[in-house]
Amino acid sequence: MSDVALTIRCAGMINSEIVTVDGEGRGSVERGTLAMNLAFSTIPDGFSVYCASLWTACCSSPTFAHERDGGVNMLTLSGGRYRCERTFDFGDYGSYDYSYELRLDRETDQMQATGVIHGSLRLPRIVGVDASLTEVMVPVGPRDVRSFAGTTFQAEDGTRIPVVVTGQYSPLDEDDADWTCCAQNQIRSSFIDLREVDGPRLGLEYTTVISGIRAPERQDVFAASGAHDG
């Protein structure tokens, strides 16, 4: 598949302020990359443009993940058409939610991500984020994949702020096949290259790999148990 042009549109409320986000980028399944430029209408006090680094381009980077060891990206799983909901929990600093619908048109190599965001954060000034994000993805039903990720932000005073990200993926089209036919427990790892952080603008590129998690064979379990007992 050729490189895909991605357009992002988002609106919602953060700290009781209306926030809109527009973005454009280009993704490559073959290279496992997605480059994005995002522009916020405003950055409310207590929020940070760095928060968008964890969005993985509004949940679209799982489509452009390079597949390894039986892992399947969202292009393989859903044809690039799915819903994604995530909660970003900063502990005592607050939390926010977003919900996106992703639509890939494979005839035109165009993809759209449209969503809403809502929540309350009271973060100190953020000056950095971890350069990688690892998400565990587990199918829990025929049309439901749940996910969990964790990372940290760095405040200006050196404080490390943990962030827990929980998510859910589901088919956008009602006639989609049973996802459990090819989905398995897997890990999506994204390296985050921040290229521009300038006021309400954020430019970055994700490089993403998705790998299957091999279930242990019975003999492996017994061997480990015997070694431990001995």
Image: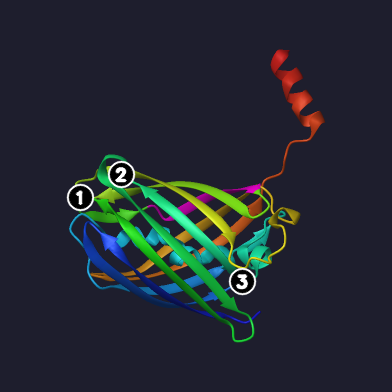
Disc 3 to disc 2, C-alpha distance: 32 Å
Nearest the viewer among 58 and 140 is: 140
Is residue 49 visible in the rendered image? The answer is yes
Are circles 1 and 3 on residues that touch, CB within 8 Å? no
Instruction: Kindly state the secondary structure of the residue where label 2 is placed.
Output: strand
Label 3 crowding class (10 Å Cα cut-off): few <14, some 14-19, many 20+? many
Q: Is residue 132 magenta?
A: yes
Are circles 3 and 2 on residues that touch, CB within 8 Å? no
Whether residue 112 sits left or right of residue 116 in the image: it is: right
| Residue at 25% over, 70% down | 200
Return the residue found at the far right: 219
User: For mark 1, what is the residue?
Assistant: 124
| Circle 1: residue type | Pro
Which label's residue is closer to the chain start, 3 or 2? Answer: 3
Return the residue found at the far front: 174
Q: Is residue 196 magenta?
A: no
User: For mark 3, what is the residue?
Assistant: 29
Q: Position of residue 15 (x, y in %)?
A: 22, 56
Residue 223 tag number: none
Up the image or down, 83 lies above or below 216; here it is below
Disc 1 to disc 3, C-alpha distance: 36 Å
The majority secondary structure of the magenta stretch comes to strand
Up the image or down, 128 lies above or below 36; here it is above
Image quadrant where residue 172 sits? bottom right
| Circle 2: residue type | Ile
Which label's residue is closer to the chain start, 1 or 2? Answer: 1
Is residue 197 visible in the rendered image? The answer is no
Residue 161 tag number: 2
| Circle 3: residue type | Val
Range of magenta residues = 130-140
| Residue at 73% over, 20% down | 225
